[in-house]
Every structure is written in structure tokens, then in C-alpha cells.
Amino acid sequence: PTVRLEDYRPSDHLIDRVELDIRLDPHDTRVTATLALRPNPVGRPGAPLVLDGDDLTLLALELDGQALGPDAYRADPSSLTLSTPPQRPFTLRIETRLDPTANTRLMGLYRSNSVYCTQCEADGFRRITYFLDRPDVLSIYTTRIEAEREAAPILLGNGNPSEAGAVPGTGRHYAVWHDPMPKPAYLFALVGGRLDRVAKDFTTMEGRRVEIAVYVEPGKGDRAAYALDAVERSMAWDETAFGRAYDLDVFNVVAVSDFNMGAMENKGLNIFNDKYVLASPETATDADYAAIEAIIAHEYFHNWSGNRVTCRDWFQLCLKEGLTVFRDQEFSSDMRSRAVHRIAEVRNLRARQFPEDAGPLAHPVRPKQYAEINNFYTATVYEKGAEIVRMLRTLIGDAAFRAGMDRYFAENDGKAATVEDFLEAFEAASGRDLSRFAEWYERPGTPRVAASGSYDASAQTYRLAFRQTRPGAGADAPPLVVPIRLGLVGSDGPLDAATSERVEAGVFVLEAAEDAVTFENVAAEPVPSLFRAFSAPVRVASSLDDAARLTLLRHDPDSFNRWEAAQRVALGLMARQVRGESTETADAFVAALGAFLDAEALHDPAFAAQILALPSEGDLADEIGTETDPDAIFSARQTLRRRLGTGLRERLMSLRETLAEPAGTPFSPDAAAAGRRALRNAALDLIAAADAQAGTALAEAQIEAATNMTDRLAGLATLALLPGEAREAALTAFAERYADEPLVLDKWFAIQAMIPEDGTVARIRRLQSHPAFAMTNPNRVRSLIGSFSLANPTQFNRPDGAGYALVAETVLALDGTNPQVAARLMTAFGPWRRLEPGRRAVAEAALRRIVATPGLSRDVSDIATRSVAG
Ligand code: ARG
Ligand code: ZN
């Protein structure tokens, strides 16, 4: 059943208050929901009441205190209907029975390591009780949770705690939570279990005292300190950056080990995949620390962008997700290096969103229809959605942007809003017409902007002409509003004297299909630096040669574009190698990187590490676009890695020495220390690419001496690419050392899944029966199978189809128990159409076998059918 945006209409009924009484039991949980309902003044008068359900068992039903006879309603596992509900406010009391232990889908109420927890977004609340499970029905919730005290000493709900006590003579106890803020059902949550707690107080700018607490598996309290600190920093930052204060007396974060996604912003009770909470130097990498900081912030920021202002319907998902990603990116940029973080954001966008937008699963940032909403929590909605918010800020400027945000929150507080409501706030704040800008939400596909420049030496002018096109867009598609942050760079540095009337605060706004700017006072032929800081999510086609790009690497005041210049040169070299063309400019590239390292590596190691990290195989496939051969791509990348490793060897060796932490230095996860580790490890990667023997020795020594997971894992990752005894010994030692650390073993699974060798499929099949592997745990599945399908292009795309078969088997094996995770794994097939014909046929056959499998979940069949359609 396809749901369409154009079919939206308000609910015929509203639910003002919800009282829940939930008696937890491993197999026989009883839920009594008392709903205060009334007809919606803007609904259809006399309409039937149809409550959503999913897999529910109804035990009892009362209307205004009277048991309802069998003729008065119809109930099945997926709905509860009253065909002639009262035309006035009334109360329904609904009792349902659940089996949380049998809930393998991890939606609704389930158990993770025997902790009771919930996940309701997008439509899991209907697996707890019959309800109007849609985001525009907002209610005030009071929840009584009861459980055996021994099994669940901690009982948490949304809002503030109001009452707790024993159930006399039973060994059970209860807690009552009241949430004063109206919210949609998808933000409901509860937790019951045995958990350790770390906490600290925070006083908001409004003077409210808040107790922040993080709950984790018993014995892991010391690994929650960083997450707790990140909550505190997030609260403080949202006050200064956006004027947003927290609004309850408690803010709870709970880490659970079985979780379908990263985390969830339930009101006052965020529930997290423990991977994004638990950190210690021994078990977490610098990347883990950064992800924890970002996701803690993301979920916290949802308190305003998502919870106080929520979405009218699921088509508006980007309204909360794109905006909240933008907000967490800004937070991380302020906590760390803005330039380095921007590079990471763009790497991620290009790795996940660009291919999605170029393949069969492409969709607008605001989709127009869906069969299964859980399949639309995508890079497009999240990351491209965030880029749209960022472009908006670039267009109207910081001050108007902040005023618009204030206005958006003020006007929509307590409401379920739309993208139109969002844009309206910025129109009012800036006085600018944003109706054409809104087109960014409406159509899929990454736009392409071609730029060409011409210099007039006698007039001392430089003319830059732009042309925008959109793949697959018809002739009727209006041009997009594209903010281009730009400047000119000469052979000795930026040409600051050059100006243009059409460029304001460094930004030219391209609004037509074609347009041009002319700069005056241009003393010599310049190199244009375009889309600084990646000012729009487009592909840029420009005819700059390598020498011009290396000028940007040397002199562009925009750090992002310096990095971009080096990436473009590397991509060009690799693409030419794939096509069998000359790569003679490689030496100039190596020399330029050498000069860069000499001048700057020690001054900004994190940035230097980004410069050294070559575009991925995926980046290259995306660049080539059609008829890709993953083996040719792999070997082109290897060749360039080897060339850099050979040409820069002395420098890389000496950087490793200089940047080594003196023995006894205490571990710090901060950006500066992480940057030094990143550069040392980027150097290790290149050295090993050029010289396996030296690489092996360095990696072994690094593992031996490592005092933190970043260095240990980097050593192991280096060895993983070097077949032989040393690798197998290191893998065995690592597994023994971390036998009791599931999150660390995930890294071990992933490293092996990414080995670009023939034996990997067989290795993964062996690992599937490793005692630490479990199909029931989403993190294990993603580590072993997800890493393989997404980050091992040569083996996933084996010409014999063994890689596709492995993933297809896993998808089908998982579909019966956890369709959401199964569907997510399926998305790895997305880019199949851009493969060369042999692999394309094999991939298509694998996809068609999945499509033809009887009894598929809606989740998997939606992805599979869209993947082969068109
Ligand atoms: N709202 C959550 C977040 O972005 C993610 C929920 C994902 N839900 C889903 N059904 N896939 O923080
Ligand atoms: Zn989110």
C-alpha cells in the first residue's frame, strides 16, 4: 500500500491525554491504555475511529467505563475500529498483551540483554497499544511502569518522574512518569532493567536545574563519562548557538546492545545503540569518540528540532532530520576543527548520498510517496537535507538565519509542522522569496554545475560562466538556486583585489540555468576557487588542469578547497589509469604533497591526514559513473597509494617519529591528539602500500606498543591488507584480547570483512559461526556483512557472484526476524546498474532472485523492487 503526500488529511480524531499502565513481564506484558479522545474539529464529522495496531492481542476494551460488546468494534492484530464512535469527547480503555522477549524486530517493546526497552519511530508504538500512530496526533502522556524489582530495579519513562513505590507483597515495584509536553506516539519510550548510572547536574540559562544521567550495562559506568560530558556540552551549545534551553527536570540516556539504528530522541529519554555511548581509550577509536559526541548532540538537539516542533507527516522527515544533522554538524565543527569536520561531512555525503541519488533508490529530500517509511531514513533525507539548511544560511546570511530559526521555533512550538512552515519563517526573517529555493526538496538527483573561465589580460577582467543541469530532470524542471562561494587565486596567493558586483560576501547565487560573473582588477590569469566549503551539494565540472589545482592546494585560503584540489588531482590520476591513459603528472602530485607536508603537516596534522587520505574506491566508481570495473578501480588506487608511499617515504617516516606520543602521555580524545594519531596512521598506510615488509614491521610494533584502540586498530588494518602469517597472528591475538568485548569484536569482524582478497567470502562464512557473531544483533550483522557489502567493492562485486550470494542469503535469513535491518543491508545493491555488463548481469540476477522470493517483508520487498525497477 503506497502512501502519498498529496493524500494527506488531518486525523478525524485527536487524543489529548494518554494514561499507560505497563506491567512488564518477559513473555506476558500487560498494557492498559486509557485514551482521552475527541473528534477533530477539522476532521470529517461522524467518521469511524480506526486505531493502528501491529501484531497486537486485544484483551479488553471499554468506552467511558463500559465494556464494549462484540458488535460495537472490530479488532485484529493490525487495527481496532469503532464504526460509530461518539461525536463528543470520550474515553477508551484498551488492554493488550505483549511478548517482549519474542519481539525480534526490535520495534515496539522488546528486550535487549534482558533490559526492557522500546523503539517507536516511525510506527512502533502501534506494537504496544492500539493508537492513532501518526506524528500529527499530539498527546500528554502519563506512564506507570511496573516490573519485578530484582529484574528491573531501574524504571524510566518520558518526562519527569512523579511517583514510585513497591507493589506490596509481590516483589514488584513501579514508577510513574509524567511528560508535560504534548508529543506524538513515536517519541514514547520506556526502559526497565538492571543498569549502572552516571550523572551530573546542569543549570539551564533559564535557571532550571536538570539532572543528566547516562545508563549503561552494569560494570561499564566508567565508559559512559564521555557521553555524559557530551550531553552537557550539547546543552550549553544549543543555548548559545540557537537560544534553546532544555525543558524538563531530568534528561536520561540509556545504552542498549540490540538496536536497529544509531539512537532515538524519545522525549527526555534518549535510547542509544551502545556503540554510540560506551567509550574508553582501550576500546574506542578516535572516530568512535567523534561519533558519540555527534550522535549524543544530534539526539539532544532533537528536543527542539523534532520534539517541541515535530513533523506533520512522515514526508516531512527532513524537517527534523536534515535540520538536526545540520545542527549536530555545527556543534561538532565548534568542538573540533571546522575545516576538518567539513571535509568529513563531504566525504560522507559523497560516499553515501551521491550514489543513492544516482541509483534506483534515488528520491527527493521530501519524498512524495512511500511503501515503507522505515526505508526513508536515508542519506538523502538526513545529509542532503542538512545541506539544504546550510545553503539557506549561506543565501540569507548568519543573522537572518538565526532570526529565522528563532521564528520557526516560536511559531511552531507544540505543533506538527511542514517544510513550508520552515521556509516561511526564513522568508519572514530575511524578506527573501524562497519559493524557488524550495525546489531543492522536490526532485532527486545530484545537480551538475559546469564552470569555465576566460581571462582578458588587457581589460584585467576574468569572466566565469556557469551552467547547471540535473540528471534525469525533464526540460520543464526549473533551475535550482545554487549558492556558489568563490574567489580567485593567483600563483602567489589569493587575488583579494579582484571583485565583482554579483558576488556578495564571497557568494554568487546561480539562479538561472546559465549565468556568468565578471571580476574586475584581475592582475594576472587566476585559478577560480569554486564552491568553497562545499557551498552546495552538486558535482562540479571544471576544466582546471592538475597544475591549476595544485595552485589551489598551495594557496587557496579555503581549507576545504585545498583538500578538494588534492582529491580532484588524485581522482583524475586514478581515472586516467583506469582508462589506460597517461599518468605522467603523478610525479608533480607527489612533489606537491611533499612540499605541503614539509610546510604544514606539523602545524595541522588532522588536516594533513585528510590531504593524504586518497579518494575511496567508491569515490572513484562514482567519478567514473558507468561500466565500472571494481578490480580496475582497486588496482588504480593501489598504484597511486604505492607511488605516494614510495615518493614520500622519508617524510612519512620522520612524521611518524616526530608525532609519536612520548611514553606516559595520558590519553586524550580531543581533536588535536586525534589529529596527530590520524596523520601517523595515514603515513603508516602509505608506507605499507609501498613496502610490505616495512609496513608489516611498523604495524606489528605499533600494535605491540599501542596504548589506545585507534593505534591498535590502525596497525591491524594495515596488516589486514598484507597477506601472510603476521596478519593471521595479529588477528588471533586481537580476538583473544577482546573476547569479552562485543563492540571491539565488531571492529575485528569488519576488518576481516574488508580484506580485498579472494578468500574473504569464505572467511566471512567461517566468521558467521564464530561464538561472538549473532544474527539477532544488528551491530554484529552490520560489522560482518554490512562492511563487506559497502566497503569491499572487489569482493562484494566478484564476477562469480559469490559476494552477492552471501549478502542475499543474509538478507533472506534475517528478513523473517528483523526486516528493517535486512532491508538496510539490501541497499548495498543500489549501484548495480553502473557496473560493467558482466557483473551487472550477475548482480541483477541476485536481485531478481530476492524479488521472486515468496513471503518477503514489506521492508525488503520495497527495496528490492525499487532496485530492479526503472
Ligand atoms: N530519529 C532517529 C534519529 O535520527 C532515527 C530513527 C530511525 N528510525 C527508523 N525507523 N529507521 O536520531
Ligand atoms: Zn535524527
Image (cartoon, rainbow, N blue to C red):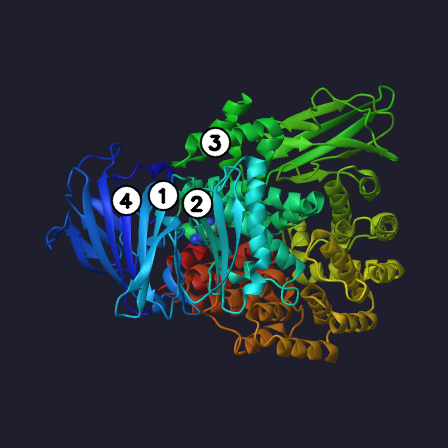
Q: Is residue 471 left or right of residue 673?
A: left
Residue neighbourhood size for the residue with mark 2, other residues' Cα within 10 Å, grouped as few (<14), some (14–19), many (≥20):
some
Return the residue at label 3.
408
User: Which labelled disc corresponds to residue 17?
Assistant: 4
What x and y, as percent, mark residue 43? 25, 35
What x and y, as percent, mark residue 736? 63, 79
**Image quadrant of residue 667?**
bottom right
Mark 2–mark 1 CB contact (< 8 Å): yes
Q: Please state which amino acid type lies under the numbered disc 2.
A: Leu
What x and y, as percent, mark residue 385? 53, 41
Mark 3–mark 1 CB contact (< 8 Å): no
Q: CA distance from mark 3 to mark 1?
A: 21 Å
Q: Nearer the viewer, mark 1 or mark 4?
A: 1
Q: CA distance from mark 4 to mark 3?
A: 26 Å
Mark 4–mark 2 CB contact (< 8 Å): no
Q: Nearer the viewer, mark 4 or mark 2?
A: 2
Question: Can residue 471 be spotted in the picture?
Answer: no
Residue neighbourhood size for the residue with mark 3, other residues' Cα within 10 Å, grouped as few (<14), some (14–19), many (≥20):
many
Q: Please state which amino acid type lies under the numbered disc 1.
A: Pro
Q: CA distance from mark 3 to mark 2?
A: 21 Å
Return the residue at label 1.
180
Q: Nearer the viewer, mark 3 or mark 1?
A: 1
Q: Nearer the viewer, mark 4 or mark 3?
A: 4
Q: Please state which amino acid type lies under the numbered disc 3.
A: Tyr
Of pointers 4 and 2, the one earlier in the residue sequence: 4
What x and y, as percent, mark residue 54? 30, 57
**171, above or below 384, in the image:** below
Residue neighbourhood size for the residue with mark 4, other residues' Cα within 10 Å, grouped as few (<14), some (14–19), many (≥20):
some
